Image (tube, rainbow, N blue to C red):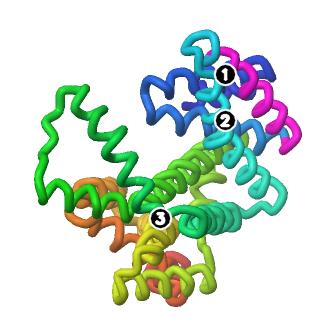
Amino acid sequence: MRALAKFIMHGRVQAVGSVVSLAILSLIVSPLAIFTTAGVALVTLVHGYREGLFNLVVSTVILTVFTSVAFSQPAVGLELALKFWLPSWFLASIVLTRQSMSLALVVATALSSLLVLGFYYFTEPAAYWYEVINKQLIPMLKDAGMQIQEGPKAEKLWLFMSKIMTGSALALFLALQTVSLLLARWWQALLYNPEGFAQEFRQLRFGKVAAAIALLITVFALTTSNELAINLFFIVIVLMMFQGLAVTHSLVAKCKLSPALLLGVYLVMVFTLQYGALGLLFIALIGSLDNWLNLRFRLCANKTQNDLN
């Protein structure tokens, strides 16, 4: 990882080349989108928002030309730039100018929530996604050789999915942008401040206002089953989840617990996704409560005092 970050920082040509190359690879292996997005953020964090914008624009032009020649689809390159690189540059610029990772992630969450609201204001999201599922997703799955269940039960599933796709898609997008920004910050720390990222991440806190809004949306979504509230719920849960992870990392460090605990937490989150994401929700609850209870201090206060004595 350090070698990749060092190569990106070697010069403009290397930075643009890395971002474009990773973007092309992400068209084949989707998770690599995290790395190309982090590349744009890293250039911005280290060299400033002007250099980051230069990198973004040049990379966009090159990628658009490539997708135009290779696939006869110039829109693919432009779409990737607008969806991934532009938000990454914007969030990295906030971190750079305000020196606050927490603020950048709160802004990202607010913008994601506004997109959900805008989608509901200008369109009928459920109808839109239902059409996408039936006309694009199902035929694509059938072409891939998958057996698609049909009948009333399947129809009920598609209807349910269509109602939550807006929030789910934007929550996934928010998670990707957050991970990319954290990755870029980690790369920056590896190159210039080895201990900086760990300290910054452990201090991640979004504040009582953000936590209160998240709590209100959660309560409203669970008690009313309102479709808009449920979609917003997916967004705010992602934000609180990252604070919960910050709390977990902080407790492991301060209380001198085994690092294996962190691995266990991440494994539980992954393996409970099919059971209503219970692990993720629990971590998000910890993150939300930390804004009022300061769990990072309270749960390790005695341990820290003993170490000082």
Which of the two discs, 2 and 1, labels the residue nearer the N terminus? Answer: 1
**Kind of residue sitting beneath label 1:** Leu
Marks 2 & 1, CB-CB < 8 Å contact: yes
Q: What's the magenta region?
A: 48-66
| Residue underneath mark 2 | 81
**Kind of residue sitting beneath label 2:** Ala
Image quadrant assignment for residue 17 = top right
Is residue 133 a member of the stretch shown in magenta? no
Dot 1: few (<14), some (14–19), or many (≥20) neighbours within 10 Å? many
Relative to 282, 296 lies left or right: right
| Residue underneath mark 1 | 63
**Kind of residue sitting beneath label 3:** Val
Q: Is residue 63 above or below residue 128?
A: above
Image quadrant assignment for residue 234 = bottom left
Dot 3: few (<14), some (14–19), or many (≥20) neighbours within 10 Å? many
| Residue underneath mark 3 | 238
Q: Is residue 239 above or below residue 137?
A: below
Q: Is residue 139 above or below residue 169?
A: above
Q: Residue at x 60, y 79 (%)?
A: 210
Give the Cα distance between marks 2 and 1: 9 Å
Q: Residue at x 51, y 80 (%)?
A: 214
Residue found at the far right of this picture: 50
Relative to 233, 179 lies left or right: right
